[in-house]
Image (cartoon, rainbow, N blue to C red):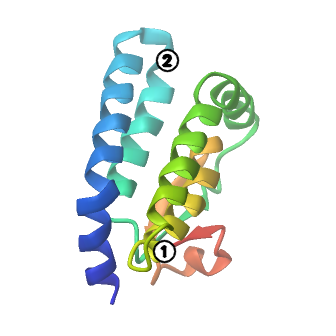
Amino acid sequence: MRTLLNLLWFVFSGLWLAIGYAVAGVVLCLLIITIPFGVACFRLSAFVVWPFGRAVVPKPDAGAPSVVANIIWFLLAGVWMALAHVVLGLVLCLTIIGIPLGLGNFKLAAVAIAPLGKEVVPISDPRAQLRVIAI
């Protein structure tokens, strides 16, 4: 079932979201001081391509710098990226087939708000049992 959902996801939203995150990552990496934000965009880009069966969990070694970076991210980009996920989720929920994909977008909106200090792991990973953000 996850494979089918991932294939539908890739066609209807994953590819476009991944391209958007990758472009934002390239722009942020061009500016030297925003490289950590660019890396977060690339991490999100890889996650949105094939999200079902993976989870986003906090990194155990993430500390105060990631909290400060998440605040900056939230103010500059997180709100807009989360809004894009919510809008796309609403559009996908208009059809019966798109409802699981729309719900996935709503969960990704929570990840897009504060992605720093987190990592993507398979659902089978013991850290995924925390179920911070799992699709």
Vertical side of 124 occupied by 109: above or below: above
Circle 1 sits in a helix, a strand or a loop, which is it? Answer: helix
Q: Which mark is residue 126?
A: none
Q: Nearer the viewer, residue 119 or 87?
A: 87
Residue type, mark 1 in image:
Ile
Circle 2 sits in a helix, a strand or a loop, which is it? Answer: helix
Vertical side of 114 occupied by 80: above or below: above
> Does residue 105 appear left or right of residue 38 in this picture?
right
Give the residue number, with chain letter if any, for mark 1: 99
Residue at position x 26%, y 62% in the image: 10
Q: Position of residue 111 (x, y in %)?
A: 59, 52
What crowding class fits label 2: few (fewer than 14 Cα within 10 Å), some (14-19), or many (20 or more)?
some
Q: Which mark is residue 34?
A: 2
Q: Can residue 111 be seen by looking at this rendering? A: yes
Image quarter (top left, top right, bottom left or bottom right) of the N terminus:
bottom left
Q: Position of residue 78 (x, y in %)?
A: 61, 35
Q: Quadrant of residue 62?
A: top right
Q: Position of residue 116 (x, y in %)?
A: 59, 41
Residue at position x 64%, y 75% in the image: 131
Residue at position x 47%, y 52% in the image: 88
> Does residue 103 appear left or right of residue 6 in this picture?
right
Vertical side of 90 occupied by 63: above or below: above
Q: Position of residue 92 (x, y in %)?
A: 44, 63
